[in-house]
Amino acid sequence: MRDALLATSLDEIPLTARGKVRDLYAIGDELVFIATDRISAFDHVLGSGIPDKGRILTQLSHFWFELLADTVPNHLLESPSAELLELLAPFEDQIAGRSMLVRRAEMFPVECVVRGYISGSGWKDYLATGSVCGIELPKGLRESERLPEPIFTPAAKINTGGHDENISYATMVETIGAEYAAELKRLTLAIYAKASAHAASKGLILADTKFEFGLVDGEIVLADEVLTPDSSRYWPASEYAPGGAQPSFDKQYVRDYLESIRWNKQAPAPGLPDEVILKTREKYMEAFRLITGRAEIEIPPAA
Ligand code: Q0Z
């Protein structure tokens, strides 16, 4: 196994944004997303990475973009320019198998969240108010219960660190306009219908997920990563038990370890023991295999 990739550097190519887990570079209107092997838990990036996590999640995103191609256009570059490929060639080891070459989009400042089940911030809001994003829900729902129908629960992006803030559909309309709001909602629900049906056929519940959209040449495109465990809650259908929080498909070993050492959830975040790293890597691979039907990720030959 290769070492975890924790940080990237493409020398003179400017880093446009660094997320908890992903690094974004831009060369004109062509962008390079690199998924590192960083992992976050309890809102902190941990001291250890999970080898291949970035490859697994990137290849999962590519799988979903392809499956969804007849539902929504996406930001992947169909033919990256020769100039871009030439610029990136020296950095193959950081890029191959873990990057997306995408078109620069004008991003909508809204996270498009869809929930088929009541969990996470949706559950908190429901407990406090009986609704989520202004959508009134039936009384007496249990945590993690399936909703009568999937709901669109947009959120406003909060810069660096802060959690996104759930907003009403009316607020979304004020932010981006009624026509775009309606189209993003329609697309989000259509994508969820297709993706959750695929997941269900593989024994997985897609409890919720979030999408980001942007405009390229005036056309709405699905951007960012899609339907990865970092942006979605997947639950094994065979273990589904409403009435409490469901174990995390991918990060439960990590959370259990961090609880076991009584980390105070303040920086600096600890590293992980090898056993937790390996078991977690296996969970990401299990998600990849179930969803894609492929036994292995593609690991490009070392230079
Ligand atoms: C996505 C993000 C990351 C930090 C900007 N196609 C696009 N065009 C323009 N901008 C973006 C995209 Cl996807 C874009 N993010 C989120 C990604 C690190 C923040 F890798 N920010």
Image (tube, helix red, strand yellow):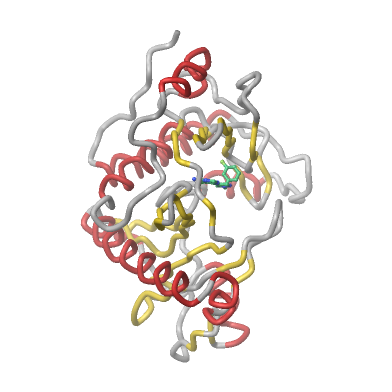
Q: Nearer the viewer, residue 125 or 180?
A: 180
Going by the image, does 213 lie left or right of 290?
Answer: right
Whole-percent x, y for residue 216 in the image:
44, 50
- From what the image shows, is residue 232 above or below residue 53? below
Which residue ends up furthest to the front in the rendered image?
217
Q: Above or below — where is 109 with respect to 26?
A: below
Furthest residue to the top? 303
Q: Position of residue 96 (x, y in %)?
A: 43, 23
Q: Examine the rendered structure and indicate whether residue 112 appears above or below residue 152.
A: above
Q: Position of residue 94 (x, y in %)?
A: 52, 21
**Nearer to me, 166 or 182:** 182
Residue drawn 47% across the image and 24% down it: 84
The quarter in which the N terminus is drawn is: top left
Does 162 sit left or right of 63 as displayed? right
Foreground residue among 221 and 136: 221
The residue positioned 58% from the left and 61% from the top of the image is: 109
- Which residue sits at x=71%, y=37%? 270
Count of marks, rendered view: 0
**136 lies above or below 30:** below
| Closer to us: 269 or 32 | 32
Judged from the image, the quadrant occupied by ligand 1 is top right
User: Residue 11, image x and y in percent?
Assistant: 65, 18
- Locate the C terminus and report the quarter of the image it occupies: top left
